[in-house]
Amino acid sequence: MNNHSLFQLESRREFLKRGAAASAVMTFSMTAPGILCQAVAQTPRNDRILVVVEMAGGNDGLNTIVPHRDPGYTKARPQLAIDGDSVLKINSEIGLHPSCRSFADLLEQGQFAVVQGVGYEQPNRSHFESMDIWHSCQRKGEVRQDGWLGRYLEQSGAAESNDPAALHLGFDKQPFALMSRDVRVPSIRSLSQFRLRGGESPRFREALDQLLESDGDRSGNDLLGFVQASTSNAITSSRRMESSGTMYQPSKPYPASGLGEKMATVAKLIAGGLQTRVYYVRIDGFDTHANQPDAHAALLREVSEAVGCLVSDVSAHGDGDRLMVMCFSEFGRRVAENASEGTDHGTAGPVLLAGAAVKAGLVGRHPSLTDLDQGDLKYHTDFRQVYAAVIEDWLEADSSPVLGGDYEALELFS
Amino acid sequence: MMKPVEQVDPNWAWEPFLATAETPWDMGAAAHLMRRAGFGATGEELRQLMARNPQDVVAELVAAQEPESFQREMASLVRASLASGGPQRLAAQWIYRMLNTPAPLLEKMTLFWHGHFATSAAKVEDSKLMQQQNELLREYALGDFSQLALEISRDPAMLLYLDSATNRKTHPNENYAREIMELFCLGEGNYTEQDIRELARCFTGWEIKREKFRINRYQQDTGEKTVLGRTGELSGEDGVATVVSQHQTARFITRKLVRFLVLDEPRAPDDLIEPLADKLREDGMRIAPTVQRILGSNLFFSMSVRGRKVRSPVEVAIGFLRTLNGSTDAFRLATTLQQLGQGLYFPPSVKGWDGGRTWINSSTLLGRSNLIRNLLGDDKTRFGKQGLEQHLTSQGARSMGEVVAYLETVLFAVPLPDTARQKIAQLADSPGAKENRLRDAVHLLCTIPEFQLA
């Protein structure tokens, strides 16, 4: 058996999964070139993955998780209210926006949860300010040097890994949440950034393989040894991406939307066995001050379909138990609609979670529509309690240094 | 022969370099100097340097200034980039400067200070102020550190970046006070929280109004303060001077210079840093003599520090091009550098670029390799205004074996593995146009681990 070509045909994970994984690894490591064994040995098998979806602009939570039986709702939203017949029911009182079909399907499978009424004290209604608060967990005037995910990555020793600790997918500015002093997070615009150019030429490819297998005298210089290990790992990653390009087939086609394409890339990277633990994607456009209904429906459809597709696809490839998706927005919108068939900046909103591990259903009550703060919903759950649960119970790390304080973790996972 | 840096005798280390049989002043040594003190040099340039005394070469590098004609050319490029907006244009302009400057050490040191006094356009969002800071860094890059620290403390881009554009008497902003001690001068553990609070009081009244620094007398706390043991009615200027005059500042800056110019790792022992730091103080905190001392030293040229640095993305790209006398689409390169983790005008945090191993991960390594491929394939890339083949021929490298040997000398800090020489020489026999085979060969050489070291 030629192990080299075997590696090109199968991702490491698929390879390990074929029955007697342990003995397969042994056989593999006895004959395979050193560089490939290393990639196998380095990957802990149960690494969990967090995908964060930022819904930028302020998602209208009230029309996402709809309290259709609440008289206050229809009263505040004569134009925009979604009627009870068309919502996708979560329970007798509350339903999902009708374009969230994929979320409803996930809910039916026990893979979707909604944390209601999430916000923070003295809410700020500026997009940038509130987004910065969600990203950094710090208020204006406090020193903001890093984001919550950056601090988590730093603390988890992610800098040691050969693969990027986290990846941001997109052309936009890197999210502040990922910033830290010590861990650099690459922004990936497309999968081609994970493919070595020139690899299409067989002579180039063959020569490169031979060059990497010849260890030369790299032992005397630690730095060179490190770069060699990283180079081997990079080439292996590139090959995995190529083979997942041919071997990996999505279990169903991803929606042809911006977020759909990003999620398809995330799925490929996961299938390729990348050790990256955090993926960050952003979808903009939720600032629906006017003509909200169609725009909002399209945005929710895009999020719901892309997340739904990712969860079911990653599950179909056997990694469902490693994946959790969290969707958040910097604030919700005012309870009362405005005169332009839109809504203005508000406060508390829902955080949406998807994945096999989440405790499905609603978490916390829907915020009251009568007990308002100057026309805005009152939050009852601090967003850092959601983060605390994600850090403690999903990523299995200590949350207080990351959040800059002790926040009681919600029970979000089963 | 190759003593680990921990065992090096500090006296020998900083004495002027004396060529020996083990460490000759040869093409390899000249290439090493030009990689560290600049962005590499062509074989022809290296041969000219070799004919001279290494101390003279170092002295000339340190003294080099941009000629007036080049300054004028750059000034008009800067104006054009500012007019067309966007910091990415500005980055392209800086790339052009690095590619073409006759004073490469000045540019290398400007880049050093950009990482040291890190300020990002992502937050400042004002290209004019970013460029103003860039010019300040260049003006003092090899000048007086005390003056540089004072000027940067009043630099609008810096103060905007660190949220210190207003400093009220009743709410002194501690951010700048903290960073000037922690990151710019002393390092963590060399001051107290009380020092930060007191230094912040010195900066009250300092503000940025209409993009300019000024002092607001009404907001100044004129009371007595005690900073790092000095007590008095200290002003902001006094505060900066107090921090800079600490002996620890000389140590901190010296250590960072040694890391930047000599080796990423292992960490140089304190007794190696101390004599250089003493000299820096004796020199009145002037940077140039210290840089000259480092670059002209036995340690700098010793084999034990060759290849002990990881090339930064800028060094990969500009080094590759300057070594092959190349030019390219600077705007496109600016974007690629950002993807590789070294966006010019966009350092990742106030701590700047950590360098060393942090440059390297699977995505940046593939990106570095692809960068070389893209440069080689780009219509706008020229080597000495010609194609790759003509350029290599002009340097005396005709056969594939000669090409590999030439590139090894000019481009590599450590020897190539034998297999690399053989395998790449074999590409000569493969079919296709010679230019394409050469590109494959160069791309392969720049993908193997040895290439990442400087």
Image (cartoon, helix red, strand yellow):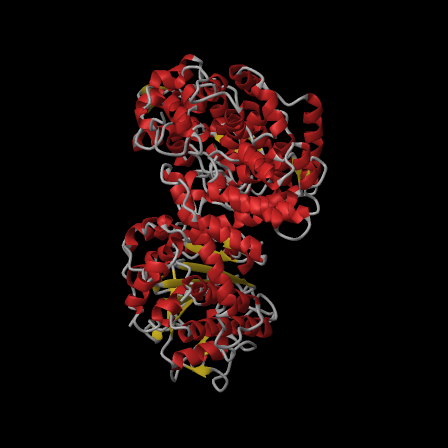
The location of residue B313, given as percent across then percent down, is: 52, 41
Front residue (pair A94, B386): B386
Q: In this view, does A339 lie above or below B381?
A: below
Give the residue furthest to the top. Answer: B282
Q: Along the horizontal axis of the image, is B128 left or right of A405?
A: right
Q: In this view, does A201 lie above or below B365?
A: below
Q: Which residue is drawn at 56% across and 20% down?
A: B50
The location of residue B24, given as percent across then percent down, is: 47, 21
Q: How many callouts does the rendering have? A: 0
* Quarter location, residue A15: bottom left
Q: Residue at x 37, y 75 (%)?
A: A111
Q: Which residue is drawn at 45% across and 17% down?
A: B17
The location of residue B282, given as percent across then percent down, is: 41, 12
The location of residue B414, given as percent across then percent down, is: 46, 35
* Quarter location, residue B273: top left
Using the rendered image of the protein, determine whether residue A377 is visible from the camera's viewpoint: no
Q: Is residue A166 above or below residue A243?
A: above
Front residue (pair A270, A69): A270
Give the residue furthest to the front. Answer: B429
Quadrant of the snapshot with the N terminus of chain B? top left
Q: In this view, does A244 lie above or below B132?
A: below
